[in-house]
Amino acid sequence: MLNNISTMLCAAQQIKSRLDDLVQTASIHDGEPWNVSSKLYATIANQFEVVSLLIRHNFIFDAFIIVRSMTEGFVDLLTIIDNPEYINEIKYYDEHETCKLFISLQEKSKTSNDANAQTKPDHEPKDRKNKHRLPTIHERLGKINRSEIYPLYKFLCQFSHNQFASLLARHEENIPQNKFSAVALDAAIKILCQAFQKLHAFTNVSDSKINQAIEYANETWEQVYAGP
């Protein structure tokens, strides 16, 4: 059975609509970590739509770049659920990087000590050897015992970093477009569904309803995706 991309795109949209129906009924738990988690899920869901659109218009290698971003968002979601205090590390890093950018763009400024004093981040993470960087994807996956995701992430990095082989393949006329499109869409739908399965951690949606939707997603996808 060959992968028919049009059929796969239609099935993927059906799955997305089924998940959306349940998400729209959800109430988010109180607390900043769960509010951020909901926004991460919404971002992953939006990016899935972007992947579908890019594949539909034959921008296959660009779709892989978005799938990589989906993967990063999913890892952040898993990390926050595992350790809600990770929010403070994200804040500290973002503020630190913003401060660095602001200082570097100042043509006329006070002494560097004064500038740093004025823009010191408020959210100091605890027990960090290097407080000016977030843990890598590999480190985060290790902490939450999900290292099996890392090979997919490294594969997707090839397209984001314009590695030599992927750069040439991007403009090759004879690449197997259906095969690459199917792989990209399969990766995107699986990330979306795995993120959806964590809905119970930050909303009031029950495990039983989540499982019913995932069962529908699996059955629908198995009918249209024959594998790479």
Image: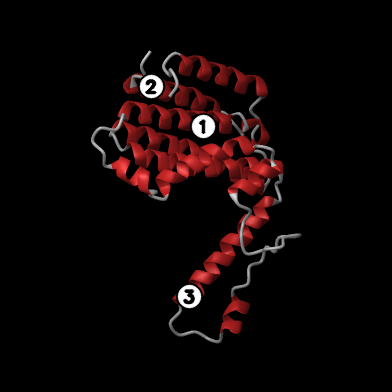
Disc on res. 213: none
Tally of marks: 3
Q: Are marks 2 and 1 in contact (CB under 8 Å)?
A: no
For marks 2 and 1, the one nearer the N-term is 2
Residue 150 in the image: state x and y as whole percent: 57, 40
- Above or below residue 210? Residue 119 is below
Viewer-side residue, 26 vs 112: 112
Residue at (37% x, 19% y) in the render:
3
Location of residue 170 (image quadrant): top left
Residue 30 visible in this rendered orientation of the protein: no
Q: CA distance from mark 1 to mark 3?
A: 38 Å
Location of residue 143 (image quadrant): top right
Residue 16 in the image: state x and y as whole percent: 46, 26
Residue at (60% x, 83% y) in the render:
114
Q: CA distance from mark 2 to mark 1?
A: 15 Å
The residue that mark 1 highlights is: 192
Left or right relative to 199: residue 67: left
| Amino acid type of the residue tagged 1 in the rendering | Leu
The secondary element bearing badge 1 is classed as helix
Q: Are marks 1 and 3 in contact (CB under 8 Å)?
A: no
Residue at (62% x, 64% y) in the render:
132
Disc on res. 104: 3
The residue that mark 2 highlights is: 8
- Above or below residue 34? Residue 114 is below
The secondary element bearing badge 3 is classed as helix
Residue 142 in the image: state x and y as whole percent: 67, 43
